[in-house]
Every structure is written in C-alpha cells, then in structure tokens.
Image (tube, rainbow, N blue to C red):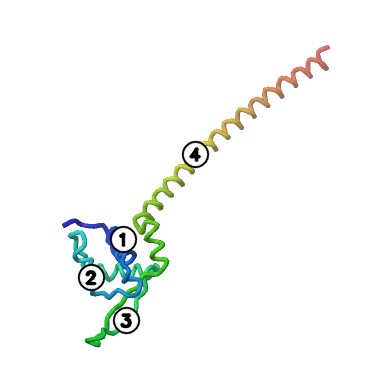
Amino acid sequence: MTELTPIKKIDTVLAFFATNKVAELYMPYEVIITYCLNEDGSKFENNELVMILNKLQKDGYILHDKGTHPSTQKDRHLYYITFEGKVFYQQGGYGQQLINSASESIRAEIAEKTQKGNQLVLIWLTVILAVGALIAAWYYLTELWKFYCHT
C-alpha cells in the first residue's frame, strides 16, 4: 500500500471525474468512495475524501447536488465535473500547478538576482565615469591655468 501525498490524492479524485463518462452526468458519493478506497492500493480516509470533494467544489471543478435514490428514496450526494474541471485536469491538475508555481518562483528569484547584479555593474560604471570626468576636468583646468596664467 503506497501513501499518496495530498496533491496526488486530489489529482486522483480529479482524474476519476475527468476520465469517467458517467461523471459528466452524475457520480454518487458511494461510487467515488469505492473507487478511492481501492485505487492504487492506497486508502483515502472518508473525511479526507469529503475535504477533497469540498476543495474541488470550492475551486469550481466539480458541482454537488442532492438527489434521491430511485429505489430506496434516500437522499444521496451526487457530484458532476465542470468544463473548468476537465480543462484543469488536461493542464495537469494540482500537481502541475504546484510545479508551475515552483518554477515561477525560481524564475522570479533568478530575475531578481540578475537585476541586482546589473544594478551593481551600473553603479561601478557610474563611479568610473565620474572619476574620469573629474580627471578630465582637472587636466583641462591645469591646461587653462598654464595658458592664461603662466605665459
């Protein structure tokens, strides 16, 4: 039995909805929990599955509705995948979102370091130009002094 990370668990449930044709119509909670308890030999806790379904619903990837079982007339929870859910799954789900976020952070950090390096180079170039301007000013002042005062 393998232990899945929370991201892998939520992606497993999202994949179940995205790859199941029945999930476009409705998916009873009982079917979802049966799938999740047996998938990959790993076990989802019942409360964990409820939290995952709530997260997917909050993010707009699935919808929840209450229905009545035709034979028993008992209330049952039905879930549907949304178009946004299908698109999100095709883009790699929460795992890919995590990877994209990490690579964006790395890219921003590299850009910041590069910018600081460029800023330091510009400061040194400014100092060199200022010193050069002072030397040129001193040279021309001495030349003017020699020409006008030393004749």
Asked if the residue under mark 1 is in contact with the one under mark 3, i.e. CB atoms within 8 Å, the reply is no
Task: Return the disc, 3 or 4, that comes first in the chain's sequence.
Answer: 3
In the drawing, what numbered circle is on residue 33? 2
Distance, label 3 to label 4, CA atoms, is 55 Å
Distance, label 2 to label 3, CA atoms, is 16 Å
Task: Return the disc, 3 or 1, that comes first in the chain's sequence.
Answer: 1
Residue 143 screen position, x and y as percent: 76, 17
| Residue under pointer 1 | 11
| Residue under pointer 3 | 66
Asked if the residue under mark 1 is in contact with the one under mark 2, i.e. CB atoms within 8 Å, the reply is no
Q: Is residue 67 left or right of residue 118?
A: left
Residue 33 screen position, x and y as percent: 23, 70
Residue closest to the eye, 120 or 31: 31
Give the quadrant of the N terminus: bottom left
Dot 1: element: helix
Residue 17 screen position, x and y as percent: 32, 67
Residue kind at label 2, given as amino acid type: Ile
- Quadrant of res 140: top right
Residue displayed at 37% across by 51% down: 99
In the drawing, what numbered circle is on residue 114? 4
Q: Residue furthest front?
A: 21
Task: Return the disc, 4 or 1, that comes first in the chain's sequence.
Answer: 1
Residue displayed at 20% across by 66% down: 37
Dot 3: element: strand
Residue kind at label 4, given as amino acid type: Thr
